[in-house]
């Protein structure tokens, strides 16, 4: 199977030779980590089967958050944690998309723009949620930033996973309507205004670089019910730690070109895209986040400081009807790993014993 690491091994040196003087350190670091992931360069352990004598060498992961090999397990660990506390209510996914007129500014000021989009979108949701026509209380939100479209184009947006309801000032749970959470047109206008005012205050020069049209067009806000409690979490877990492209989507690399599959947003029919290697690498690297930037954030009663309120909310909830829909995302999911890591012998199937440590052949990536 062709992997992203293969692309970087084969075409990365040429890309660095041509664009190295313009590459950010975070881009170099991500490429280096992905190439080294689960190779002898990372070190690992020897596993031995005491029944048949088979020996396996398993190498360590790079733990870089942009590596497609390292994020699947993190998604399932997140899922296990959330399943223990998530409220058994209708769940919604709310998406805020940065308009095209702002994307060039966003590329040049990622930390500022991404952080501002998080802040103003969360504020807008809580502001409208306080209106008794909609909820009449505080909402809980888990937000994750994605910066890509399905063909690796630059397309910054935030997905929020939200229980359908809010918490009144007296601690009473207020359920939302079954298929309606908040008015998206009002959210669009409110987020646009808050973002405009926030950017003008935070960085006047950056604000001046934004085309005036950005403040007059409709910002895309989308809201949809995604199932009940646990079903919704299983559907959305891959969104939390997904990277710009997974290895399963890469079909081939040959003659200086990379071919991968994707599903356009307007149809369920898969398509194939072929790009020159340098363009493919450029598109991937533009989704490397600034060092230390927090891409998953919690708000309202799902924030870490208020999660103690969840038990009291749960006591107020009636049993929820079963949702028979198939909430599987159908894209790049593998079976959930066992919480206890066990290596089985590929020859006889017995549990293998962990043996000596394999030292890294080079310094581990920072």
Image (cartoon, rainbow, N blue to C red):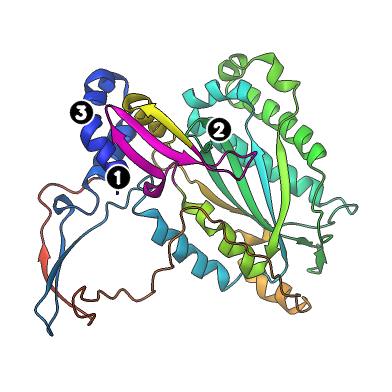
Along the horizontal axis of the image, is 202 left or right of 336? right
Along the horizontal axis of the image, is 310 left or right of 348? right
Give the residues drawn in magenta, as a range. 243-271
Residue for point 20% across, 80% down: 348
Where is mark 2, residue-wise?
Answer: 155
The percent coordinates of residue 22 (x first, y second) are: 32, 20
Which quarter of the rendering shows the C terminus? top left
Q: Does the residue at mark 1 contact the one at mark 2 (Cβ under 8 Å)?
A: no
Q: Is residue 364 above or below residue 221?
A: below
Viewer-nearest of discs 1 and 2: 1
Where is mark 3, residue-wise?
Answer: 13
Where is mark 1, residue-wise?
Answer: 2
Dot 3 falls on a residue whose secondary structure is: helix
Dot 2 falls on a residue whose secondary structure is: strand
Badge 1 or badge 2: first in the primary sequence: 1
Along the horizontal axis of the image, is 97 left or right of 167? left
């Amino acid at each position: 199977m062709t992997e992203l690491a293969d692309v970087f091994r084969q075409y990365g040196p040429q890309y660095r030779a041509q664009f190295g003087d313009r590459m950010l350190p975070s881009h170099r670091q991500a490429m280096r980590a992905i190439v080294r992931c689960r190779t002898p360069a990372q070190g690992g352990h020897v596993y031995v089967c005491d029944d048949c004598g088979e020996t396996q060498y398993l190498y360590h992961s790079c733990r870089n958050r942009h590596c497609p090999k390292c994020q699947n397990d993190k998604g399932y660990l997140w899922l296990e944690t959330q399943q223990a506390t998530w409220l058994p209510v209708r769940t919604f996914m709310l998406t805020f998309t940065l308009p095209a007129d702002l994307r060039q500014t966003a590329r040049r000021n990622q930390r500022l723009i991404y952080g501002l989009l998080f802040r103003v979108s969360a504020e807008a949701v809580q502001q409208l949620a306080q209106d008794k026509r909609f909820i009449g209380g505080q909402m809980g939100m888990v937000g994750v930033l994605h910066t890509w479209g399905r063909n690796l184009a630059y397309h910054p947006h935030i997905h929020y996973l939200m229980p359908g309801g809010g918490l009144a000032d007296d601690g009473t749970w207020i359920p939302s309507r079954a298929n309606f959470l908040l008015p998206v047109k009002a959210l669009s206008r409110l987020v646009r205004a808050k973002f405009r005012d926030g950017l003008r205050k935070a960085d006047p020069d950056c604000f001046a670089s934004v085309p005036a049209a950005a403040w007059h067009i409709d910002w895309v806000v989308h809201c949809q019910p995604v199932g009940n409690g646990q079903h919704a979490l299983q559907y959305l877990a891959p969104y939390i730690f997904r990277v710009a492209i997974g290895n399963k989507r890469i079909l081939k690399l040959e003659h200086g070109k990379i071919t991968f599959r994707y599903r356009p947003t307007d149809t369920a029919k898969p398509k194939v895209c072929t790009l020159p290697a340098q363009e493919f690498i450029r598109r991937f690297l533009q989704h490397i986040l600034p060092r230390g930037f927090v891409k998953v954030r919690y708000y309202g009663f799902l924030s870490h400081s208020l999660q103690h309120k969840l038990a009291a909310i749960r006591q107020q909830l009636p049993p929820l009807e079963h949702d028979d829909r198939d909430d599987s995302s159908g894209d790049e999911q593998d079976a959930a790993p066992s919480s206890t890591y066990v290596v089985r012998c590929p020859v006889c199937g017995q549990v293998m014993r962990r043996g000596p440590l394999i030292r890294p052949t080079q310094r581990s990536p920072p």
